[in-house]
Each structure stands twice: as structure tokens, then as C-alpha cells.
Image (cartoon, rainbow, N blue to C red):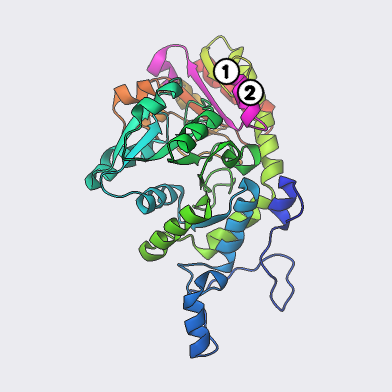
């Protein structure tokens, strides 16, 4: 595509129209595709990238969704999954062998950390962790069998920022695959491939869908790596459904305008919280008080929609705050049009030991807000009355 603007790529990336010349891509709810004759069937299986054979392998809707993410991320190829975690698991399972080693940031999504700590060790795959302020220790953690360096930025749920360029340079120096979970930033705010990432993973369930309707995940990046992910996934079956792909592909068309409003709201909410007497800590990448504020502005277009803060008074005050919420939703999801309040220690990261939670900045009173698209005055009024009750 000639256009360099993300907004246009999000809208104008489309697979070839059918004979009906539809303006918007239809839903292809079919499990398989037919062939003209034996020769066509043989040729299709010999060069399956060029046509659809079976919807577990590819489908026009999933292909369009993947192509849009690739265009926005600057990736060569991708594969779409039934959920964000199926994208994470399948990507690691496709690229790792028994006795391989991962170096990962400690501040990652709870389910991903459970995968590293409890599931991959079944196949003798081990993980060493570095803290967000210990990037210089990454090289000390690298072993001869280290295959992947993994990171999220911004992190979940404490919205810390990692220097992707430094990590990318380390990975390149040691010939290690660098994978970034870009879920919080989306392809509109940040493109990790520019900083040296080999693969980028998204839980499309979150901001890419943006309305809490469907599950989905996607991995994009270098052709030779995605080929391994594709071959693993076409045989193990974690493929995204055509209907969900259609929803997500349409959602991408409004992603830039939605994200800008999310970010504008989030900055206003973070500023309000920072001035509230009942709040002792606020973290939002585009607040000047954020420890990695300048780095965030270098890597991201805006600050995202996630605000983390801590209520004075510890876990009891935090519980009172959550129980006093009236307008905002109490949910473990994020990236919805509706603002969502989550208590990570008891929900998204509850399976982690207390020591592990504290090491990643998840205190007992930490609250995560996924700021939605409601009017900011209404969000602030609800937060204010809940804080006063806390």
C-alpha cells in the first residue's frame, strides 16, 4: 500500500472483492473450499499460501484482519488466533524445543507468567526474569540455550515502559528472537518492529475490538518465524473464527479515532487522580510524574487507555473504593468503550504468589482503570464519590 498513514491502512486494506463488488467485506462462514479438478487440488495443496483450502488454515476474513495488522505494524506476515493467550502459547510452542530458555520481563500478564512458570516447564523449557528497571541485567541472564527475549510495554497492570530499542539491540547481538506483547499500545500507538522486535503479539479481544464483543489474537512479524507459527497452528487448531475476524477487521477501521479519545480521557482521569487527597500513587505513561515519561513519548504516539493507581489506606480502602463504584464496570477485561475498574491482585494476577506480585509492582491496593469513551466528567464524578467513600 502506497499510503504511509495508519488511519488509511486501517480502513483501506481489503482482500479482493467478489463478483458482487461489495464495498465492505462479507463474512465467509465456510469450513472449506472446493477445487475445479484433481490438478487444481494438487496445485493448491502444493502452494497453499496462494489460496484458501480449509478455514483452519486460512479464510478471507482472517486474511484481511491479519493483513491490516501487518500493514499497521510493519510486519511481513501473520496468523490469527481464537484468543490472545492462544496466540501467546502457540507462538512459544512453535518456536521452542525441549531444554530451550526464555528471558522475560517480570511484569507481564498473569496468564503469560503462569504459562512460563507452570506449563512450559513440563517440556523442560525454563524462564529467567528481569525487572523493569534492570534491563542492564538481561545479558547476564542469557544462556547458550536462550531462544527468546519477551516483553510487554506498557506493562500489565502497572503501565511501566521498557526501552524496546535497548532490548532489541541485545537480542540482535546474541541472535535471539525478540517478541513484544503490544496489546496495551495497539499498532496505532506503537510499532515494536521499528525498535527491533521480530514478532508482535496482540490480544485483539482488548482495544482492537474495543467493544467487548469477541475474542481474538494475532501474531505478526518476520516471514520465517511466522511460517513456523503457521505450521504449528494449522495442525493444532487455535485458529480465529471467520465471524470474529470479520468483527475485528471492521473494528480496526475505527481504531485510530477510538484510541485517541481513549488516550485523551485517560490523561484527564490520571491528572484528576494525581490531585486527589485519597490517592497516593498514580501511573500513566504521559503524566510527567511517570518514571519513564520521556521514554514513553519516544516510543508511543499517546499514553494509552490504562491508568494504575493506589488508594490510601491499603487493601481495605481499595475494597471500599471498588464496592462504591456505581457507573464504571467491575470486570477483568480492558479496552472496552465502557470504563472498567479492576483489582489485579485478586483478579488478573491472583494466581501469582504475593512475592511475585509485589516484585512486579502489584500491591494489595493497586487499582487498574481501563478508561473508556464515556464523558470524562461522568467518569471523574464516579471515581470521586468512590474515593471519598474509601
Q: Is residue 269 magenta?
A: no
Please tell me whether residue 277 is drawn above or below residue 370 in the rendered image. above
* Magenta extent: 291-318
Badge 2 marks a residue whose secondary structure is: loop
Read off the residue under disc 1. 290
Q: Residue 351 at what x, y percent from top left?
A: 31, 34
Looking at the image, residue 223 lies above or below residue 144: below
Which residue appears at 61% of the width and 12% of the height? Answer: 275
Q: Nearer the viewer, residue 220 or 186?
A: 220
Q: Quadrant of the N terminus?
A: bottom right
2 and 1 marks in contact (CB < 8 Å): yes
In the current view of this chain or complex, which residue is farthest to the top? 277
Q: Position of residue 295 (x, y in %)?
A: 60, 23
Task: From the top left corner, tell me how far across and down residue 195 is, in percent.
Answer: 58, 36
All told, the count of numbered labels is: 2
**Is 291 displayed left or right of 251 in the figure?**
left
Percent coordinates x, y for residue 57 in the rendering: 47, 67
| Direction from residue 31 to residue 195 in the image, left or right | right
Whole-angstrom CA distance, mark 2 to mark 1, is 7 Å
Residue 210 vs 157, above or below: the answer is: below
Residue 179 visible: yes
Depth check: give the residue in front, 292 or 22: 292
Q: Which residue is mark 2?
A: 286
Amino acid at each position: 500500500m502506497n499510503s504511509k498513514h495508519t488511519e488509511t491502512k486501517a480502513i483501506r486494506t481489503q482482500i479482493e472483492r467478489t463478483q458482487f463488488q461489495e464495498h465492505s467485506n462479507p463474512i465467509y462462514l465456510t469450513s472449506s473450499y472446493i477445487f475445479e479438478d484433481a490438478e487444481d487440488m494438487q496445485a493448491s495443496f502444493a502452494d497453499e499460501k496462494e489460496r484458501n483450502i480449509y478455514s483452519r488454515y486460512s479464510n478471507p476474513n482472517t486474511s484481511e484482519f491479519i493483513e491490516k495488522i501487518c500493514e499497521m505494524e510493519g510486519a511481513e506476515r501473520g496468523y490469527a488466533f481464537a484468543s490472545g493467550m492462544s496466540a501467546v502459547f502457540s507462538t512459544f510452542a512453535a518456536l521452542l524445543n525441549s531444554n530451550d530458555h526464555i528471558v522475560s520481563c517480570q511484569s507481564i500478564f498473569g496468564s503469560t507468567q503462569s504459562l512460563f512458570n507452570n506449563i512450559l516447564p513440563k517440556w523442560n523449557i525454563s524462564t529467567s526474569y528481569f525487572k523493569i528497571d534492570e534491563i542492564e541485567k538481561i545479558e547476564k541472564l542469557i544462556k547458550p540455550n536462550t531462544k527468546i527475549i519477551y516483553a510487554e510495554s506498557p506493562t500489565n497492570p502497572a503501565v511501566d515502559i521498557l526501552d524496546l530499542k535497548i532490548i532489541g539491540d541485545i537480542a540482535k547481538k546474541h541472535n535471539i528472537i525478540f517478541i513484544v506483547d503490544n496489546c496495551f499500545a495497539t499498532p496505532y500507538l506503537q510499532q515494536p518492529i521499528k525498535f527491533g522486535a521480530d514478532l508482535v503479539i496482540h490480544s485483539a479481544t482488548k482495544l482492537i475490538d474495543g467493544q467487548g464483543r469477541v475474542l481474538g489474537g494475532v501474531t505478526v512479524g518476520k516471514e520465517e518465524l511466522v511460517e513456523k507459527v503457521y505450521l504449528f497452528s494449522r495442525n493444532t487448531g487455535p485458529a480465529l473464527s471467520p465471524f470474529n475476524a470479520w468483527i475485528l477487521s471492521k473494528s480496526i477501521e475505527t481504531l485510530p479515532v477510538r484510541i485517541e479519545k481513549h488516550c485523551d480521557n485517560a490523561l484527564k482521569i490520571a491528572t484528576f487522580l494525581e490531585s486527589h487527597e485519597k490517592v497516593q500513587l498514580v501511573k500513566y505513561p504521559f503524566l510527567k510524574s511517570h518514571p519513564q515519561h520521556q521514554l514513553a513519548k519516544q516510543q508511543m504516539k499517546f499514553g494509552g487507555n490504562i491508568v494504575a493507581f493506589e488508594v490510601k489506606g491499603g487493601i481495605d480502602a481499595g475494597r471500599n473504593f471498588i464496592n462504591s463504584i456505581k457507573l464504571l464496570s467491575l470486570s477483568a477485561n480492558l479496552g472496552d468503550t465502557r470504563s472498567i475498574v479492576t483489582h489485579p491482585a485478586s483478579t488478573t494476577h491472583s494466581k501469582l504468589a504475593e512475592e511475585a506480585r509485589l516484585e512486579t509492582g502489584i500491591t494489595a491496593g493497586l487499582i487498574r482503570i481501563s478508561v473508556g469513551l464515556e464523558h470524562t466528567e461522568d467518569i471523574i464524578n464516579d471515581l470521586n464519590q468512590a474515593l471519598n467513600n474509601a
